[in-house]
Amino acid sequence: MADSKKTGIRTVAQNKKAFHDYFVEDKYEAGIALSGTEIKSIRAGGVNLKDSYCQIKNGEIWAVGIHISPYEHGTIFNREPLRDRKLLMHKKEILKLEGQTAQKGLTLVPLSLYFSGQRIKVEVGLCRGKKMYDKRDSIAKAESDREIERRLKDKTNRQI
């Protein structure tokens, strides 16, 4: 916790469903173009990344399906909650991602939304879809890890 205060990074939202549905091959950081009331709503925690994805159109990268709740104290300047939002990346990175998604059958998924200093950043993952048996394997591994941790905790508590 002390490390995040030093670097100024504070996570606002995570896309847990993305880690369940995809294998994350690579991660990239991108800025996001927002209006003032959207930033206030994000500071209040009114954001959801579930079922969101990214598209590359005309050399620009867009986040689709990020739900940012309307700011409750906002006026006519509130924006539509599910509008497409432009992500800010270098042109070279966008072209590289466009090539990888076209060739290998990969997809771009927003993994988390966080504050880096005063700016809001999006962590975008280059992901490959999981099959049903992969999901079952992941769930079984997580359950066995939890069971091991539980038994180790019980064993250490008995020794004390």
Image (spheres, helix red, strand yellow):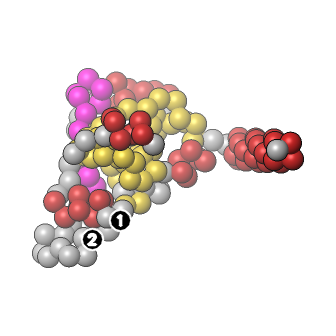
Residue at 41% of width from left, 36% of height from top? Answer: 3
Residue occupying the far left of the picture: 76
Q: Are marks 2 and 1 in contact (CB under 8 Å)?
A: yes
Q: Is residue 51 left or right of residue 20?
A: left
| Quarter of the image that includes the N terminus | top left
Viewer-proximal residue among 63 and 76:
76
Q: Is residue 8 left or right of residue 134?
A: left
x, y (%) of residue 54?
A: 37, 45
Dot 2: within a 10 Å radius of its alpha carbon, few (fewer than 14), some, or many (20 or more) residues? many
Q: How far apart in space, not on screen, are marks 2 and 1 (Cα)?
A: 8 Å
Query: In the picture shown, does residue 99 fall above or below 75?
Result: above
x, y (%) of residue 28?
A: 38, 32
Is residue 56 in view? no
Report the span colored magenta: 84-95
Three-letter amino acid code of the residue under disc 1? Gly
Query: In the picture shown, does residue 83 fall above or below 53?
Result: below
